[in-house]
Image (cartoon, helix red, strand yellow):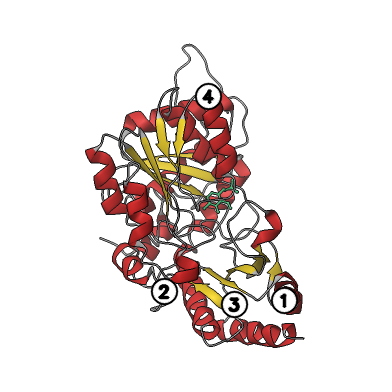
Amino acid sequence: MTGDGTRAVRAGLPEPKAHEPALPGPVFAAHFHLPGEATGPYTYGRDTNPTWTRLEAAIGELESPDEPAHTVTFASGMAAITAVLFSQLRTGDAVVLPGDGYQLLPAVRARLESYGIEVRTPHRPSTRASHTPVDAALDAQLGILEGARLLWIETPSNPGLDVYDIRRLADAAHARGALVAVDNTLATPLGQRPLDLGADLSVASGTKALTGHGDVLLGYVTTRDAALADDVRLWRKTVGAIPGPMESWLAHRSLATLALRVRQQADGALALATALADRPEVTGLRHPGLPSDPSHALAVRQMRPGRFGCVVSFVLPDKAYAERFLAALTLVDDATSFGGVRSTAERRARWGGDDIPEGFVRFSVGVEEPEDLVADVLRALDAAKA
Ligand SMILES: Cc1ncc(COP(=O)(O)O)c(C=O)c1O
């Protein structure tokens, strides 16, 4: 039994072979030599590719170290999410989607509804504003499960950072015959293992902390159910949402440092959240690692110790205040996305679509020294007072 960091440096690598590299380079091939019958393992580049095979084995080892699992990689997180939804749902089915999930989910909802699929979204109590117990949000999801074919959980959620009880929701969904998918983007498989907590599918954007350098778009689905994996693989082949070999190879190379990055980012995020908690101009501060956070107790039960993710969210008094703050930062890029080695922050409301105030800042902590980052943020807050 090895630790996560040890597993991550070797995950998916072939057995060492004299005079061969540890991680063979990307295989660029639209087709493979195929004499005779059209059988695998490698036939056509939209079906299979050896660079995907190695990456998929690696992600599977991290998401499910103790039981065999199947991973299917995609061109992006959205390709992975929609592969699950559109391969599993049929006209007349019902699906429960989160009310506070990734901002493109409403567009997905509209598309599902246009195909005659009922989409249910729980009413979301405002935990950010009032510190209402997170259980209320959970109960809202439980209340609309009856007859649903699939329950989608995003935890911690983006950008609100609420944590949902995967075990409790999965048990309730399974008792009603529903499948459970968890968006594991924010935590990464080193922060949380949805399949061990009862989910049928762990789905993520590898664009974020998994690959962590802000230079790759990628998505994946991992499941222990071979038939489910076949469904999503067939969906990938049908719509052609395949990852490029170069991206797949870069992603695989990045996994070797995943444990280091996740640890450093979580330490930095906690240091930042702790410093922000003392600032009067900051409200609605959320980070699951912060002991005062409404999600902290559940995060401690469900997530891996000390790995509560790299995102801190908070609200500054108004739009102009938040923009002055972002402009005054010197170590932090004003950019979207999260999980990268360089810290980024953005005024999230600039995109529209999320139920958040104009001064809401989503901050993604990189691997800088936490004290440098905290000093930069406190200085920028002072500058933003203007
Ligand atoms: C939680 C979550 N899931 C899915 C996605 C979509 O991933 P991608 O941008 O790789 O399509 C994002 C992107 O921000 C995300 O934050």
Q: CA distance from mark 3 to mark 1?
A: 25 Å
Q: Amino acid at mark 1?
A: Tyr
Q: Earlier in the sequence, mark 3 or mark 1?
A: 1
What is the number of the mark on residue 46? Answer: none
Residue that label 1 marks: 321
Q: Nearer the viewer, residue 340 or 134?
A: 134
Q: Nearer the viewer, mark 2 or mark 3?
A: 2
Residue at 54 percent across and 23 percent down: it is 238
Q: CA distance from mark 2 to mark 1?
A: 24 Å
Residue that label 3 marks: 368
Q: Is residue 99 left or right of residue 200?
A: right
Q: Earlier in the sequence, mark 4 or mark 3?
A: 4
Q: Could you classify mark 4 by the number of other residues whose Cα lies within 10 Å: few (under 14), some (14-19), or many (20 or more)?
A: some
Q: Could you classify mark 2 by the number of other residues whose Cα lies within 10 Å: few (under 14), some (14-19), or many (20 or more)?
A: many
Farthest residue toward the left? 175
Asked if the residue under mark 1 is in contact with the one under mark 3, i.e. CB atoms within 8 Å, the reply is no
Q: Nearer the viewer, residue 256 or 348?
A: 348
Find residue 45 and report its horizontal and vertical position in percent: 58, 28
Q: Earlier in the sequence, mark 4 or mark 1?
A: 4
In the rendered view, would you say 283 is above or below 88? below
Q: Earlier in the sequence, mark 2 or mark 3?
A: 2
Find residue 381 and report its horizontal and vertical position in percent: 67, 84
Residue at 53 percent across and 55 percent down: it is 253
Q: Is residue 178 visible?
A: yes
What is the number of the mark on residue 293? Answer: 2
Q: Nearer the viewer, residue 321 or 161?
A: 321
In the rendered view, would you say 321 is above or below 216? below
Residue at 77 percent across and 86 percent down: it is 386
Query: In terms of secondary structure, where does tag 2 sit?
Result: loop
Residue that label 4 marks: 115
